Image (cartoon, rainbow, N blue to C red):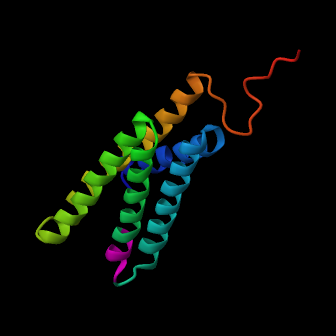
Amino acid sequence: MTPWVLATHVLAWTAFVVAIAAGGRTERLAGLILLADYLASALIFSQALPAGRVIAASTEAIAIVAILWQAFQRDRWWLIVAAASLVLSGLTGLIAVLSPDIDRYELLSAQVGQWMIVYLALAAGTGERWLAGEAAPGSRWPPRKRS
């Protein structure tokens, strides 16, 4: 595993934990969608299924549609960034299918960078919410003033 792939995994898990623990409804939903795609892809590639690439592409397509839907429904800047990066990642996979002479490592190196942008956007969106003083649903921060 290269240092970039390891950094992507660390960034992904950090973004998942931060979004689910401290994010609002939008960040939590996006974090859960991306976590489900991450775990499904890991499971698919660990099993070495014959149609693994097709199944992984379909789970990524579901994540793309879900994040795009959120981007058009919510007014969060980071959803647009994450959706654009996910669409680019999907197009990168489509190019690899249409042009089989592209090396597998070239495809993966392009997608690692695109997924880093998705995870950075998720973490930055959650951080922006926290810096703006918006409390996560169900949290007691900021403390309520007693009268």
Front residue of 120 and 26: 26
Work out which quarter of the rendered image holds the N terminus and state it.
Answer: bottom left
Give the residue drawn at x 30%, y 46%: 84
Q: Position of residue 129 (x, y in %)?
A: 55, 29
Magenta residue check for 52: yes
Classify 124 as above or below 49: above
Q: Position of residue 121 (x, y in %)?
A: 42, 38
Left or right, 144 with respect to 10, comes to right
Q: Main secondary structure of the magenta part?
A: helix
State the image quarter where residue 77 is shown.
top left
Give the residue drawn at x 41%, y 64%: 62
Classify 47 as above or below 118: below
Tell me where the magenta segment starts and ends, as one range.
51-56
Front residue of 142 and 72: 72
Query: Exactly how many numbered labels are in the figure?
Result: 0
Work out which quarter of the rendered image holds the C terminus and state it.
Answer: top right
Classify 92 as above or below 129: below
Residue 81 visible in the snapshot? yes
Left or right, 125 with respect to 96, comes to right
Q: Position of residue 89 (x, y in %)?
A: 28, 55
Give the residue drawn at x 62%, y 22%: 133
